[in-house]
Image (tube, rainbow, N blue to C red):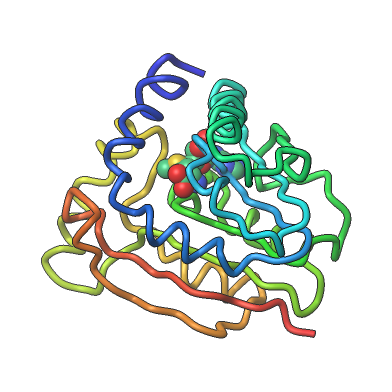
Amino acid sequence: MGIHEAYILPAIMDVALAGLRDEREQLVGRAAGRVLEVGVGNGANLPFYPDAAREVVALEPCATVLARAQKRLGKQARQQPGIDLARYAFVRGGAEQMDFEDDSFDTAVACLVFCTIPAAQRAASEVFRVLKPGGKLLFLEHVRCPPGTMQRVQNAINPAWKVFACGCHLNRDTEALFSDAGFAYNRIERYRNPKMSPPFAAYMIKGEALKPV
Ligand SMILES: C[S@@+](CC[C@H](N)C(=O)[O-])C[C@H]1O[C@@H](n2cnc3c(N)ncnc32)[C@H](O)[C@@H]1O
């Protein structure tokens, strides 16, 4: 784990993703029951979980980043007494192989993470495995844009971007990854988000997919 990945990129992410606050709140506002958030990063979503999310397991492979998320939530809880720290658990690990039981979560959250997970298809299958039948995957992801000039730009920049952004891919087809893992889309919005920059990283999907009963 290099200094860039552990310290510099998380600080850049805070600034670059600051415009997504409302979308984060809307996304995790639909979480309920026992919740798994994969690749929690700095923990930007954590203060927004509603009371209906009785337990929130925050998974993150980078120890420094995970510690930062936990520290930040503690600080926010001191300022906002409504945040109940007891319902959060911080677990170090990658989403490709999780030590959680089958059918053990009601909700999974994937926010700007499937771009970065090295074995993304395997991780999608793991998320599917640990969700209960009828459980939902809430997602907000930047993805490959439709065919055309911008997609060619994404493909051209991707090798350098992956180095700068610690493994993040600009051109992942995350919608297909989730379907291939077995998820059925309940709701999906495909859009270009003006709050995301640079423009070649602004193509997004957000919505809800279900593990069929
Ligand atoms: C762009 S950041 C997004 C962080 C956070 N989800 C957010 O919304 O701000 C991508 C995160 O994915 C994490 N990540 C990388 N490999 C992973 C893996 N195999 N499983 C789960 N998360 C991973 C990174 O450590 C990083 O925290």
Quadrant for residue 23, please give it.
bottom left
Residue sitting at 49 percent across and 35 percent down? 42
Relative to 129, is 82 on the left or the right? left
Image location of residue 45, percent across then percent down: 51, 49
Above or below: residue 54 compared with residue 198: below
How many numbered tags mark residues here? 0
Above or below: residue 94 compared with residue 21: above
In which quadrant of the rendered image does the C terminus lie? bottom right
Depth check, front residue: 154 or 38: 38
Image location of residue 104, percent across then percent down: 85, 60
Image location of residue 108, percent across then percent down: 66, 61
Residue sitting at 47 percent across and 21 percent down? 6
Image location of residue 89, percent across then percent down: 75, 39
Quadrant for residue 67, please give it.
top right
Residue sitting at 67 percent across and 76 percent down? 182
Residue sitting at 59 percent across and 69 percent down? 30
